[in-house]
Amino acid sequence: MLLDNHFEDLTFSKEKIINTSHTVAEGYTNLVHWHPFAEILLSLKEGNEVKLNFRKYEMKPNDFIISYPGDLHSINNVSPDSFMMVQFPMELITVVHDFNRIKPVLVKNPFCRYDIDDTDIGNMVITFKEIVDENSSDIAFKEANNYILLLKFFSMYAKWCMNNHIEKNDADDEGYYRSSRMIAEACLYISQNCTEPLTLDDVARKIGISKSYFSHLFKDYTKTTFVDYLTKERIRRAESMFMESRMKFIDIAFECGFTSISSFNRTFKKIKGISPREFRNAMIRSVETKIE
């Protein structure tokens, strides 16, 4: 199977959670492969070519492209020093709820064409190069600084994706733009209103499309149903309230949009694998251990 034959493994140690390079390993040039981590490639030369999920991108200096875990991609007809590269576990980004909520939009828009007149793109390129340069230095707290820069890069990139800056190489791209904007708006609206008795109809009306079209589009982008996405948002909200030990579970359940404590307990255990009480006790023990 293609995915098995072209798997690229990479271990991130606790001492080094972000890998960078000024070159592309020759063994992976012109080879379709995938990996369980995210990778950003910044083109340094004219005429570079990257294929990502069977779509070809002709790249110029300072263009960048992002492959996410599981994406099939190849870097073709290039010399080893044609790219700068940053690799990292996707969890570094998705642990931040702002990014996790709009991840479907980011995945749909992996390519950014450099524009000398676009300050936002210029700042992203500068930040990316800072990550690579700093990672090869000997400064103190290098990993912490790199993580801050990585979050800064994705913060700018997420805003860029949501502000109409999507490459228009073919007729489908305008559709990608409209769809991306709608799903980004929907995800943010769900997150902000997940404690309310929200329905698919409500969100579809909010973004101005039919219920059936929204349902199809939402699942295409998020790979999950509206109900499952809403439920997970409610569970995330509950997790953030668990450290307030004075709050009763029934109060947390109702504040997070559940209609009964039994429904909350059942749903939480299905998603997290343990009960709410076990989860909160584990959180409290973890904090107490760190304090000691």
Image: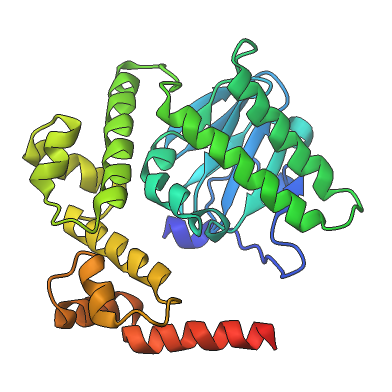
- Splitting the image into 4 quarters, where does residue 156 fall? top right
Quadrant holding the N terminus: bottom left
Residue 193 vs 176, above or below: the answer is: below
Residue 132: percent from the left, percent from the top? 77, 42
Residue 274 vs 104, above or below: the answer is: below
Tell me which residue sits at (40%, 76%) in the image: 242
Q: Residue furthest front?
A: 246
Tell me which residue sits at (89%, 48%) in the image: 137
Residue 171 vs 290, above or below: the answer is: above
In this picture the colour scheme is rainbow
Q: Is residue 201 visible?
A: yes
Residue 288: percent from the left, percent from the top? 60, 87
Tell me which residue sits at (52%, 44%) in the image: 67
Q: Residue furthest right?
A: 138
Q: Viewed as shown, does residue 3 lie left or right of 223?
A: right
Q: Nearer the viewer, residue 225 or 20?
A: 225
- Splitting the image into 4 quarters, where does residue 202 fall? top left
Q: Viewed as shown, does residue 127 lie left or right of 153?
A: right
Quadrant holding the C terminus: bottom right
Tell me which residue sits at (27%, 24%) in the image: 175
Residue 137 vs 113, above or below: the answer is: below
Residue 86: percent from the left, percent from the top? 68, 46
Q: Nearer the viewer, residue 16 or 195?
A: 195
Residue 153: percent from the left, percent from the top? 62, 39
Q: Is residue 274 visible?
A: no
Count of labels in the image = 0
Q: Nearer the viewer, residue 141 or 6?
A: 141
